[in-house]
Amino acid sequence: LAEGHEWMGGASTAKNGITCNPNIPTEEVFTTPHARRVEGHVSSTKPLSYQGTLIDEISVRFEGGRIVEAKASKGEDVLKKVLDTDEGARRLGEVALVPHSSPISKSGLLFFNTLFDENAACHIALGQCYSKCFVNGASLSQDEIAERGGNKSFIHIDWMIGSDKVDIDGLGKDGSRVPVMRKGEWA
């Protein structure tokens, strides 16, 4: 995760003082991964509907934070165009945890709208990070966000990677592991 990151729940307060929390009842929490340190493979567990194209069975490989290999069983040509949007499009801007038992997941529906579909599973987002996912993020410059590992891009596209088979551990700086999710549910 990025240096100085913090986990958020999505609530925001409008200028009129009314607070909106769009992530309830899904229990989504999200933060910023380090854009230059992500390593390994990840595959989608649900299709991504992107501007009228269904992209299914996405599989990518990261090296040094950058997607160096990408495949999809459907919509691969669109996925590859998205990845070529700009330099930051091949890096992550968000990682989000959502329990498999969320109401959207339980519905079994694909809404063909990322704002709804992302609440069905843990997900990651290609592209732009959220500055609010840094301690005192609103006061940080773009350069300071980048120094801490935040990504910059014209896109921010969420796609689902969670299921009832996902186990997630938090890793301490000392290498210790703390169970966060087991079988897709909060530990």
Image (cartoon, rainbow, N blue to C red):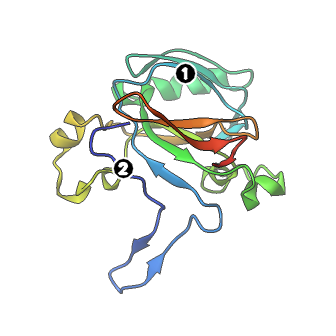
- As drawn, 158 above or below 75: below
Q: Residue at x 72, y 37 (%)?
A: 47
Residue 54 x, y percent position in the rendering: 71, 36
Q: Quadrant of residue 34?
A: top left
Of residue 33 and residue 127, the one placed in the foreground of this image is: 33
Q: Is residue 123 visible?
A: yes
- As drawn, 5 above or below 12: above
Rendered image: mark on residue 80: 1
Q: Quadrant of residue 27?
A: bottom right
Q: Is residue 155 left or right of residue 150?
A: right
Of residue 168 and residue 18, the one placed in the foreground of this image is: 168
Residue 24 x, y percent position in the rendering: 60, 68
Please state which amino acid type lies under the numbered disc 1.
Lys
Distance from disc 2 to disc 1, alpha carbons, whole Å, reads 23 Å
Q: Residues within 10 Å of mark 1 (few under 14, many from 20)?
A: some
Residue 99 x, y percent position in the rendering: 67, 51
Residue behind mark 2: 130
Q: Residue at x 43, y 57 (%)?
A: 8
Mark 1: secondary structure: helix
